[in-house]
Every structure is written in C-alpha cells, then in structure tokens.
Amino acid sequence: MDIQYDVIIIGCGPAGLTAAIYASRANLKTMILEGETPGGKLTKTYEIENYPGIKKISGVDLAMQMMEHGQEFGAELNFGKVVDVEDLGESKLIKLEDGQQFTCKAVIVATGTKERLLDVPNADQFTGRGVSYCAVCDGAFYKGKKVTVIGGGNSALEESLYLTQLVDQVNIVIRRDEFRAEAKTVEKVKSNPKINIVHKHLPHELVVEDGKVAGLVVRNVETNELTTLECSGIFPYIGADPATDFLKNLGVLNEAGYMIVDENMATKVKGIYGAGDVVVKDLRQVVTATNDGAIAANSVARLLNE
C-alpha cells in the first residue's frame, strides 16, 4: 500500500497545531485533519490571560496565529470527520465519513473534547434558539437581556464575565457551594455587580413562552425546592467528554474514553500517539496542550528516524 504521509495529525487545536510545527520542521510529510472548526476550543474562548509571553489575547486571535504557524513549514490542512483508524503495522489507515482514506506511518490524535449537552427535557429542541454552548458565538443575541450560565469551572466563569459586557444580568448556577475555577477568575466573578450566583442548584426544566426560552427552573440539591430564574438564554458549561469514538477498536482508551499514553505521548499501539485534552491528565489548558503536541511530534520523528 502506498503510504502518503509520514504523520497525520487528527485535530487542529493547540495540541495538533504545535505537533504540526514540530513534525514539519523535522522534515516529516505532515497533514492535519480537522472535522470541525480550526483552532479548537480557542475559537469559543473570549480571552486568554495565562499563555506565557502573551499577557492578554482573544481566543480567536491566538487560534489564527497558531493556524498560520502550524502550516508555516509545509504541513497540509484537510477537512473531514475521521470515523476509523486502522493499525496495519508499519502503516496506519485513516477513514473519513465522506469516504476519503489516507495512509501514514504514524498518527497523532489531538481531537480534544466535546461539550456535554444540557440534560433537561426539550433542551435539544432549543439548541441555537435559547440554549447555546458558545457565549462568544451567540452572546450578542442577548444584548440587554438576562441569561443563565450553568457550571462552576473556568470556562463557565470566563464566559460569564464576557457575557456581562453584553447583557443586563448573568445568573451562574452551580451544584456546589464553591467554584472550581482559578482564584483570580473567581474574584472577578464575585465582584461583578451583574452576576447573580445560585449555589447548590441543578437545572431542572426549561421555561418556554411563545416558542422561546423564557427561563430555567433549578432544583436545590439539598431540599429539592424548585426556583425559576428568568432568562432568555442558557449557556451550559457542565463538562466535556473526549472525542475518541473512532479509536474504540484499538484498545488505547480508558473507561471514560480518554487516551492512555506514556511520557512520550505514545499509546500501546506502535505509531499512534495522543496529545492535548484527549489524553488522561490532570490539567487541561492551552499551555499543556502545546506541550503534549511538541512531545508527540518529537516522538514520531524519533520513531521514524529509527
């Protein structure tokens, strides 16, 4: 079988783009495959303040800079959803949903995670019509209105702060009595007069009037008492799951679907590597994703040189 590439990188976020830089600089014939939006979750992030050397930058701007840099040394970019990766020993076969197939000597999987959907009745019917998973994308639709953000992590709080620039009020619903976000971000949220924090509650059901979202009923986790929050938009940030369905036949995933890798970002299948949010790890940040991408690409280069 003709092997078309030295390495194919699946995913075009910070991990994948960093891997592309290192792989192409090592003179490896490299292709990046992206199934959705180049830049990964960066494109849905309003502002980045913890990337070394850059004090403050929008997620979209950082994503575009990484995109340009990722292709600077010859890496190709192609689009398509990967549905299967086959291990053929010395080569790997990548199958896409549209029928395309590509072969390579090594694969770096950097597909990241997908947001968990709001688990209340009829939420799917109102996705894009009152329920949104991207404040940067859809926040402008709610200018001068009230919105509710669900979640207590960094993403929930950062997007809440962004929304305060557009809306009259942001309710933040968390199931605990304390946030899980960085202390600096928590301070900003607690001091913002537009933010109303609702502790120890979970979403229960949507309030719909005239075919539009008009509020969210939340349930107290201790008393089960129901409360209605008036809002026109709901932004769930309730965690994410790894985008690894196409790897399920290779035995490289843990029970939660994350890739199991060693210190070289290698899985137990020779020639298949993971990088970024998709691997088992404690901290999922842009800077840790770029670290993984660099290590994975360097490992591939070393493998192929051997």
Image (tube, grey):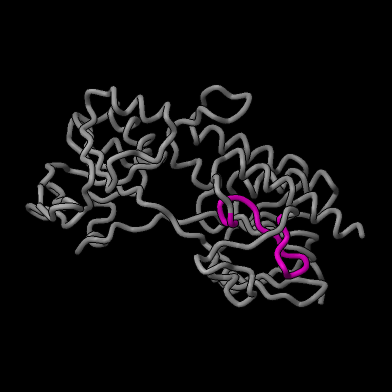
Of residue 1 and residue 158, the one placed in the foreground of this image is 158
Q: Which span is picked out in magenta?
A: 265-280
Residue drawn at (44%, 38%), measured in percent from left and top? 45
Q: Tell me if residue 299 comes above or below residue 232 in the rendering.
A: below
- Where is residue 187? Give x, y as percent: 36, 25
- Type of secondary structure dominating the magenta stretch: loop
Residue at the limit of the structure toward the front, as seen here: 222
- Where is residue 53? Give x, y as percent: 63, 24
Q: Tell me if residue 190 comes above or below residue 98 in the rendering.
A: above
- Residue 7 forms part of the magenta stretch: no
**Quadrant the C terminus occupies:** bottom right
Residue 137: tell me if it is visible: no
- Residue 275 forms part of the magenta stretch: yes
Image side of residue 34 versus residue 31, left or right: left
- Where is residue 160? Give x, y as percent: 32, 35
Of residue 102 and residue 203, the one placed in the foreground of this image is 203
* Quadrant of res 105: bottom right
Image side of residue 120 versus residue 109, left or right: left
Residue drawn at (44%, 42%), measured in percent from left and top? 44
